[in-house]
Structures are given as structure tokens and as C-alpha cells.
Amino acid sequence: MTYNFDERIDRRGTNAESVDAFRHALFGKESETIIFPCPEEELIRMWVADMEFATPEVVVDAIRARLDRRIFGYTANLDSAYYDAFVRWTQDRYGWGFSREEMMTSKGVVPALYDLVSYLCAPDEKVLIFTPSYAPFRRAVTFHHLTCLCSPLKKDGAHYTIDFEDVSRKLEDPKVRLCIFCNPHNPTGRLWSREELERFGQLCRDKGIWIISDEIHCDLLRTGKQHIPLAKLFPDYDRIITCMSPSKTFNIAGLMISNVIIPNAELRKTWHTRQHHSENPISLVAAQAAYEKGGDWLAQLLAYLDGNMALTKEILKAELPEAKFCIPEATYLAWIDLGAYFPPEERLTRFFAAEAGVLLEDSSMFLQDGESCIRLNLASPRPVVREALGRICRAVKERGGREMPCSR
Ligand code: LCS
């Protein structure tokens, strides 16, 4: 079967955050002051990280079949069917497995992060993250009044690496208890290599630091790339918690189900005493069907995303040759440095909304160390991606040189 990723699906009237939450999420109180260059329905949305593609039919079928059972009472992950489907997925793709008792489910990776930080850290302890970063990492730390330490990634052109000297220095602080690690990395799209993972894991292991390895983007790889779960490299170190989810992979983030693998028995005990174990019955069958039957759809999705990435590279090279962009090794997110065209203080989210009618996220959404970068979500039909890039390039060219102040 061939899937139609070119289909445009109307999300209006479904309370989709992408469509109906952008004013507050991207512009806050300023939203009333922005004049868009087109009617709202013609804005191109490339911000929140979900996809404009239909969830695979096998998932929708499983939901329909569950709806036909007509009772949606209290439900939990009781039989082994979901575990069996997910562990087969990780074994087949990553050569990595875990026992049934190690696998927890949660209402999302972010809720799991908030909870795990509170289970693992005492009030005066610190948590290390890498920047630029998915912003909820820091929120999960500061929410509990803990200190967040940032280790800036090193940047060479558009390529990012871990600054191991900096990490090593920061881990010398005895208050550092936990690291929230992102692999593949949002927003840069880095898929950390075996060598990088080994080095990072070893540094943490030497100090007994806990790691939450957020691998939510791990299924969304460019052709030929291989994801390595961090925990696979340290089978004897039980302080690595792995988060994976069908939500990004199969576009079911709204169903709110994710997987948390906890090898440490003590932490599992804490999890069990503090978590509420009910599941949404629809989410459970959807996630199971995705892992059991969604492989073929995913293969075609990845090929399509490869195409969108290649198109982006080609258009940028031709139209904005000073933009720094490497096709990311994973994710459907393009992280583009426009520092050659804008001064560092330029507010690019606002600029591209007002001048191009494209909703995207600039570096201010990713804590720090992403100056002059924008993140484009390329999980859209290709004609939409082409149109968005056309508008973006036109807006940059019409604006003129780096020194010119932004017109709005
Ligand atoms: N972890 C990472 C690294 C993410 O990128 C996201 C979603 C989540 C966790 C959320 O997981 P959930 O709680 O839904 O299971 N990233 C988004 C982003 O960058 N923009 O919108 C969502």
C-alpha cells in the first residue's frame, strides 16, 4: 500500500494546538499587535512538533474496533499485549529489550519528566541539560525549585557536538544528581554516535549521576541512520531511564501515552506508589496497533521526510546561501541558522509571522545557545513545505541586509 502524504487535512475546529494555540504560545500578550500578511487560514504552521499527516489507517482501525466494544470503563495495561508489541519494536529496530516489569506507561514524556525529577532529586540538587534545549526540560526542573545547569552544545557551522570538557566540569559539582538527555536531540536533530553516547554515559556513570534519556524522536531517522538507545550501551548501570513514545512517530500525541523504561527496582517502587495507573483504553489499543502494524507506514513516512529535508536544503542553498543548515540525522525538524541575514536580537518568530505568514519557532523557544536560529517543522505535505520556504526566502530577501532594522 502507498500512503498519500501529500493530502492536506483540515484541522480547524478540532482544538488542534497547531491551529488554535499559536497566538498565545508564540506571541503571548503581543499577539494582538501582529498584523499577518494573509488571512489566518492561509498562515503556514511549522511550529508545534506534531505532523500534518493522517495517523496510519491501521491505528485508526484499531481505535474503531475498540469504539465498537462500546464500554470505556477503567482500563489499565494489564495483559502483556502492549509490552509484547513495543519490546518487539525496540528489539527489531534497536537490538535492545527490557523486561515487562521495567516498562511503565505515562500520559506523556513531559509528565514523566516532571514526576521523575521529583522522585530522584532532593530540594537543593541540580540537573544538567544541554542547550539549545526543548524548553520543558528546564521547566520540569525549576517547577520543583531545583537548579538547572546548562551545558552549551559546541557548534561548528551547522553541526553540533557535546562539549565533554564542559560536561565533565559541571559533573564535578556534587549537587548534580540528574541529567536530562535528548537523543535524537531537539532542536538540532543530532543523533548521538556510539562514541558520544559511550563517553557521555561513562562520565555520568563514574559519578553515579542519573540520566533520563528522552528518545521520543528515535523512530524518525533519516535513511541509513541507526539509533542507539543509551541504556543499551550500559546494561549494568541501572540509573538510565529511557523514554520512548508512539506519539511523535505515528502522530498520536493527543492520545497521551508514552513508555518509560525504569531498570532500577527502587525507583520502580516509587513510581508505582506515586503514579495513577489507569490508561485511556483508546490510547492503549492505538499505541499497540502502531507498534504491531505501523512499520510499513513509517518506512514511507521516513522516505517522504527525507524528500522534504532535501528540498529544504536545495531551496536554502539556492535562495539563502548564507543560511547554515545540515539535514538533521533524525526528527522532522529543520534547525536553520540565519545569523548571516539578521542581527542576533531580531525576533524571528515575529518577523516570519508578520512578513511571511509562516508560524515557526525561533531560538527564544529553546532556552539559550541557539541565537539567530529558526526551527521549521517539515512534517507537512511537500507543496506546503515548498510554499513556506518560498515565503521565508522572499521575506528575508525583501528585508535586505543584516544591518537593516526590522520593519515591524
Ligand atoms: N520530549 C521531547 C524531546 C520533545 O520534543 C517532545 C515534544 C516531548 C518530549 C513531548 O512528549 P509528550 O509529553 O507529548 O509525550 N516536542 C515538541 C516540540 O518541540 N514542540 O511541540 C512539541
Image (cartoon, rainbow, N blue to C red):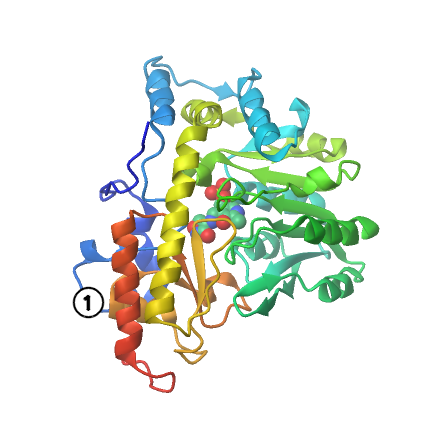
Where is residue 228? Give x, y as percent.
Answer: 63, 42
Relative vertical location of residue 367 with respect to residue 115 in this rendering, above or below: below
- Location of residue 276 (image quadrant): top right
Label 1 residue SS: loop
- Location of residue 88 (image quadrant): top right
Where is residue 346? Give x, y as percent.
Answer: 40, 77
Name the residue that disc number 1 marks.
37
- Location of residue 196 (image quadrant): bottom right
Asked if residue 258 can be seen in this view, the reply is yes
Relative vertical location of residue 38 with respect to residue 144 in this rendering, above or below: below
Relative vertical location of residue 247 with respect to residue 148 in this rendering, above or below: above
Left or right position of 11 against 208: left
- Taking depth in this image into account, of 70 and 389 the one nearest to the observer is 389
Locate the C terminus and report the quarter of the image it occupies: bottom left
- Taking depth in this image into account, of 2 and 275 the one nearest to the observer is 2
Where is residue 317? Give x, y as percent.
Answer: 38, 67
Left or right position of 113 against 17: right
Left or right position of 65 against 115: left
Q: Which residue lies furthest to the left in this view?
A: 39
Q: What residue type is labelled 1?
A: Pro
